[in-house]
Image (cartoon, grey):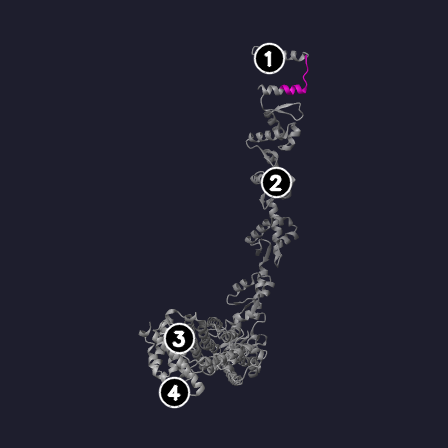
Amino acid sequence: MDDFSLEDLQAALQSAQEQKSTAKLSDRNVVELVNKLQECGLLGEDLLHSVNGREYVTAAHLKTEVTDAVNGAGGRIAVVNLPAQLAVDLLHCEHAAQQAVAESNGQLRIVQGELITVDYFDNLAAEIDEILQAGGVIPLGDLAAQFALGSELLMSVVAPRMNKTIHGRLEGGLLYTSAYIARIKAQIRGALRGASTPVNVPHLLKRIQLDGLTTGSNIASNIIEELVSEGAIRGVLRGGGSSWTPTIYAKSQQESVRRFYEQNSYIGYDTVSKLGISSAKQHLQTTFPDGIALETAFVNPTVVHQLDASAEDAAASGSWCDLQALLPPALTRDDITVLLEHCSVIQPSGQGKTVTGACTLHAGTCIVSHVFQQQLREQVLSEARQAAETAQQQRQATAKTASPSQPSAGQQKPSNTKSGGKAAAAAAAAADDSAEEDWDMSKSKGGKGKKGSKKKPAGKGKGSTSAAPAAPKQSNKNQNQTDAAHSSELSVHALTDKVLEWHPDMDDAGSHGKLAHALASYLRPAALAEFDKAMAAVFVASAESRRRRRDAIAHAAGDSWQHFQLYLHGCQVFAEDETTSTALQRHLVRTTGASLMDWLLRYQDVDTQDEQVPGSSGGQDQGRLPVVPIPAQERQQLMSRLPPDIAPVLKEGADRLNNTADAQDAEKSILAAAESLGMRLKPLDKKAERALVQMQLDDLTAQLADQMDPATALSLVVPVLVMQVHGKAVTVPGRALAGIISNLKGTLEPGDFDLLQSYHQTVVSHLRAISSDGSGSPEVEAIQEQLTTNLPLLKALHRTDKIS
């Protein structure tokens, strides 16, 4: 085709167009043909189909059409408007627009879905400048609404063109000219010069028809601060530029505060606040640095000088005075307390420490000289001593009335003394049982008692650890009631009446008229201490005596408990012999068990007893007390005085000792009773048991060596043999001797056993003969002579070389 010229080609085209086609193609055939050509690679892939389906356009041509459309619209067109104008789908238009922006070198931008050129922004700036020059001020918000642009976009357009295309100032979202600022400045200067009181700046701008500046109040604030710096106006701008206070008003405020403060020697913070001064306390501290800042008011130091003068007069005269008239009426009670602390001669009461001063503050506003206070103290202490003397006399009368010989109210009711009666019956039954089972009717019968009452020295005994009684005693209760009754004479109310009786002029003095009450409260601890001192002196000796008695009883109970356990272990040796074991346990419960229960009752009741424990001396301390049974009537009184919390346990223990022959059952009752009293009874260990057995053996051996009565000697030989053979101690009743002797068979040589058994039978015959014929009959004398002859042989049985 290079051989053909342009004219030849045009002629060939014209000839082809003039020829009639032999076949016509439909639109569908054309589309298929174009698609086929694209598949064969004869057409480019950027060929785009129009919206109406009758045209094809390339991407490059579409980009050109997009650029032409933006320029044709004045430099700004919405992307969504391009499909209708170019007849191409929106997706292709957006793609073409992005390519156009990328190739525009910054001259074209897509902003908020619109295509905008730089020339459009330049023209927009020129138009904004025309509007600004005409109006003087324009809010950016109005421009953004007018031109349908975002505020941030408009700011990015306007800011770079300030003082170039746009001639003015941009501040606080406002565009304004210098002429507008000069006009506004003049208006504000005139308005503020005419203000003599604090004004609200936004309200002032509204009154002078500049309320449009309220949305940009920084302009007004900057103008006001500029006027202040120039000296055109005088005052202070506060509240972030929302409040203007003229200098003349501040001077008037300070003058009013100063005049009130100097005339009244104080000023309240509420008064200062009403004058329009904020932070009243800090303002007063700055204005009057020598003043005293309180919680509700600011006080002149001259008030303190007046208070000191009045206090010095009261101290010099040895009297008291009320400072209420000298104090500012606006002060609260806390303010008065703080203010009086600045007085050099006043010592606030209740400090608990020595302070240099001559007066003490009472009832909030009253000062009392130390001389007057000491005189009043002596009067109150005298009243306390008289009350103590009255209480002591009343206590003595009560003690005489409530003597042990007179039953208490609880004892007069049979229904309340059932357990006490059983306990008394238990003591009587124990005594009767001992008499019935004891076959030794000679005058030396007491030796057997010595055997049963032999104790380990109390110096290092392990029987118990005593504690204080578990509950208050009835006598102490009566005494406390007496003390409380007479202490009511020293109550605050009673002492207040006494103070008013001595000094009637104190009525209505002090805060709420409570000076007399305050002095009574202040002096009452000293009065009670004096009362207690006087009362305590009476009971010092008796308290020491009770302590010694308690310790002695505790040691006696511990020793009795050790022997109870010792004899209980001895009973276990004869467990196979039921008759003998029962007799031994019954005897143990009725003697040592009953004695131990008596000690527990005495321990509980020691504080109510003014007399000595039977058999003890006043100077006895930690010593060994003799076993003295409690009489039935005294036992009943002890039971009736038991506190309610421990009475059931002790009464149940006493009843069980009376009704049981089981020593282990009695042991549990004794332990429960001791625990209720707070007394811990220690168990008997093997080492202590061996020591007690050896002591018993030595003691009985010594008694046996000097004993000449046959019956008593036999009663000593049998337990000695038991200890030597079994290593256990027993307390032996007369009825159990036969069983114990039988138990020793096989442990002694036959001759010795026969001697022991024969001697026992002879003693029994001797006692029966005395009961039937009398002590002077020939038969009794013959048996007595036989017993005396064989007594040395009996004594020889306890030797260890005679024991197999």
Identify the amino acid type marked 4. Glu
User: Where does residue 405 sit, x and y in percent of width and height?
Assistant: 52, 85
Q: Nearer the viewer, mark 1 or mark 4?
A: 4
What is the crowding at mark 3: few (fewer than 14 residues within 10 Å), some, or many (at least 20)? Answer: some
User: Which stretch is magenta?
Assistant: 21-33
The front one of 330 and 745 is 745
The answer to if 800 sits in the magenta stretch is no
User: Where does residue 332 sit, x and y in percent of width and height?
Assistant: 57, 69
Circle 2 residue: 150
Circle 3 residue: 741
Q: Nearer the viewer, mark 2 or mark 4?
A: 4
Distance from disc 1 to disc 2, alpha carbons, whole Å, reads: 57 Å
Q: Nearer the viewer, mark 2 or mark 3?
A: 3
What is the crowding at mark 1: few (fewer than 14 residues within 10 Å), some, or many (at least 20)? Answer: few
The reply to whether discs 1 and 3 touch (Cβ–Cβ < 8 Å) is no
Res 315 seen here: no
Task: Report the residue that reaches farthest toward the bottom.
Answer: 776
Circle 4 residue: 781
Res 329 seen here: yes
Q: Nearer the viewer, mark 1 or mark 3?
A: 3
Circle 1 residue: 6
177 to 516, vertically: above or below: above
Identify the amino acid type marked 3. Ile
Distance from disc 2 to disc 3, alpha carbons, whole Å, reads: 128 Å
User: Where does residue 800 sit, x and y in percent of width and height?
Assistant: 32, 74
Q: Is residue 422 left or right of residue 448?
A: right
